[in-house]
Image: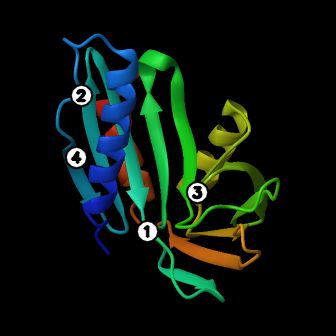
Amino acid sequence: MRLNLLIPILFFAFTTALAATFVPSGARAQGVERLGDFADWSAFKFTEGDSVTCFIASEPTKAEGNYTARGEIHAMVTRRPAEDRIDEVSIQAGYVYQENAPVEIQVGAMKVKLFTQGETAWAVDNPTDRKLVDAMIRGSTMVVRGVSSRGTQTTDTYSLSGFTKAYRAIERACAG
């Protein structure tokens, strides 16, 4: 499965808008470069001013829940070396998460709780991100369980096939 181009374009638009808020007008984000597709994961790179950002992303192979519609669903690992943000794991649910309801990620026997804001969930700290990435490198599937603001429980299953190769691609492109 190849990641839909809509995700990196939306990510690029968001980061460009954010960068325009905080970066002097002479420094703008450059286009997103696709580093490659690796089985179920895709790797990308872009530059904001002098800072390079890389990320990998995937869509779930299975999305379950009693809902009628959902937006874009994907998992990402982002590297922003200039900000000392390495291996930041995030989940985009395709809906607004229920307030104060943690999201659970399971990779093999390891389970981790994430905090949420709007449609996105993140690990609580860098060591948790690192544990998740290590588990994703070793694992074959990742299951994400969340609850929407309407109380709908969802379970999204991601293949980790190609994760390691995609991760190595952003390690090389965004060393930090």
Secondary structure under tag 3 reads: loop
| Front label number (1 vs 2) | 2
Q: Nearer the viewer, mark 2 or mark 4?
A: 2
Q: Is residue 172 visible?
A: no
Q: Sequence order check: which comes first, mark 1 or mark 3?
A: 1
Disc on the earlier residue, 2 or 4: 2
The residue carrying pointer 4 sits among few (fewer than 14), some (14 to 19) or many (20 or more) residues within 10 Å by Cα, namely: some
- The total number of labels drawn is 4
Q: Earlier in the sequence, mark 1 or mark 2?
A: 2
Q: Please give the label number shown on residue 35.
A: 4
Whole-number angstrom distance, CA of label 3 to CA of label 4: 26 Å
Residue name at image x 71 percent, y 33 percent: 125
Instruction: Point out residue 47 in the picture as x, y percentages from the top left corner.
Output: 25, 27
Kind of residue indicated by mark 4: Leu
Split into 4 quadrants, where in the image is the N terminus? bottom left
Mark in front: 4 vs 1: 1
Q: Amino acid at mark 2?
A: Ala
Q: Position of residue 37 (x, y in %)?
A: 26, 60
The residue drawn where x is 52% and y is 19% is: 84
The residue identified by callout 2 is 29
Vertical side of 81 occupied by 113: above or below:
below
The three-letter amino acid code for the residue at tag 3 is Glu
Residue 170 left/right relative to 139: left
Query: Circle 1 sits on which residue?
Result: 59
Q: Is there a contact, CB below 8 Å, between mark 2 and mark 4? A: no
Q: Which of the two residues, 146 or 172, is positioned nearer the viewer here?
A: 146
Query: What residue sits 66% from the left and 77% below the top?
Result: 155
Q: Which residue is mark 3?
A: 119
Mark 2 falls on what kind of element? loop
